[in-house]
Image: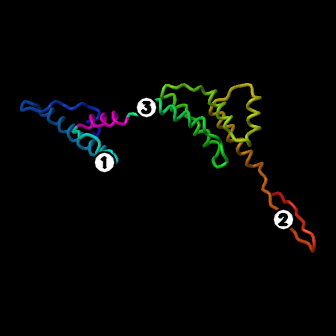
Amino acid sequence: MDLDLALRVDEPPTLTYESMQDERDHYEEWERSNRLSLLLIQSHIVQSIRTSLPKNTNAKEFLETVQEQFVTSDKALVATLMGKLVSLKHTADKGVREHIMEMDVATQLQALKVEIFESFLVFFIINSLSVEYSQFKISYNIHKGKWSLNKLLTMCVQDEGRLRQEKLETTNLVVRGKNKEKKAGVFL
């Protein structure tokens, strides 16, 4: 349908009486694409923001205007991502895979020209794990080689499975006698 034609191609020169038929056809295609693109873009912008934007008849220029008004500071985004990285700690309410995926902000930081080495990220993630992963941490520290992020993810998920199997459910059974109360712990 060439809806993005107006975004890909600059506006053709204004038609004149001497314009050829292929120039007229191209201009009509571009004009249709521009109109539909503007309608589509504007329909996806919140009304309160849309009213603050200048009226524009060119979709490409309209997007450039929006970009200029809503430019984010790369430094602020880096600070936010670094804060997220430093503050995340593994908790029992989420799985270890989800925790590691949340902490992998290195790809976002690299796009902002902040380099985080994978070995640093692996070490940082291991230190953010909860105390139930103490044996895992010791095992990693004893291991001579360096792990990739994928290997860390695989090993943590395996250890999480091991931890689940080792957890014992405890049920207390209370038996009352005439004068004495007997308690016995039953482990399943």
Mark 1 falls on what kind of element?
helix
Q: Residue furthest right?
A: 179
Labels 1, 3: front one: 3
Task: Residue 117: say if magenta.
Answer: no
Mark 3 falls on what kind of element?
loop
Label 3 – label 2 distance at C-alpha = 61 Å
| 2 or 1: tag closer to the N-terminus | 1
**Please, what is the dominant secondary structure of the magenta stretch?**
helix
Q: Return the x and y of residue 114 as percentages of the image width and height.
A: 52, 26
**Drawn side of residue 81 relative to residue 59, left or right:** right
> Mark 2 is on which residue type?
Leu
Tell me whether circle 1 and circle 3 mark residues in contact (CB < 8 Å). Answer: no
Q: Which class describes the residues within 10 Å of circle 1: few (<14), some (14-19), or many (20+)? A: few
Q: Return the x and y of residue 30 as percentages of the image width and height.
A: 21, 37
**Drawn side of residue 59 relative to residue 163, left or right:** left
Residue 151: quarter of image: top right
Label 2 – label 1 distance at C-alpha = 64 Å
Q: Which residues are magenta?
A: 58-70
Q: Which class describes the residues within 10 Å of circle 2: few (<14), some (14-19), or many (20+)? A: few
Q: Return the x and y of residue 41 as percentages of the image width and height.
A: 31, 43
Rendered-image quadrant of the N terminus: top left
Task: Residue 65: say if magenta.
Answer: yes
- Residue for badge 2: 173
- Residue for badge 1: 43
Residue drawn 65% across the image and 32% down it: 124
- Residue for badge 3: 73
| 3 or 2: tag closer to the N-terminus | 3
**Drawn side of residue 152 relative to residue 13, left or right:** right
Camera-side residue of 90 and 165: 90
Mark 2 falls on what kind of element?
strand
Q: Is residue 184 above or below residue 159?
A: below
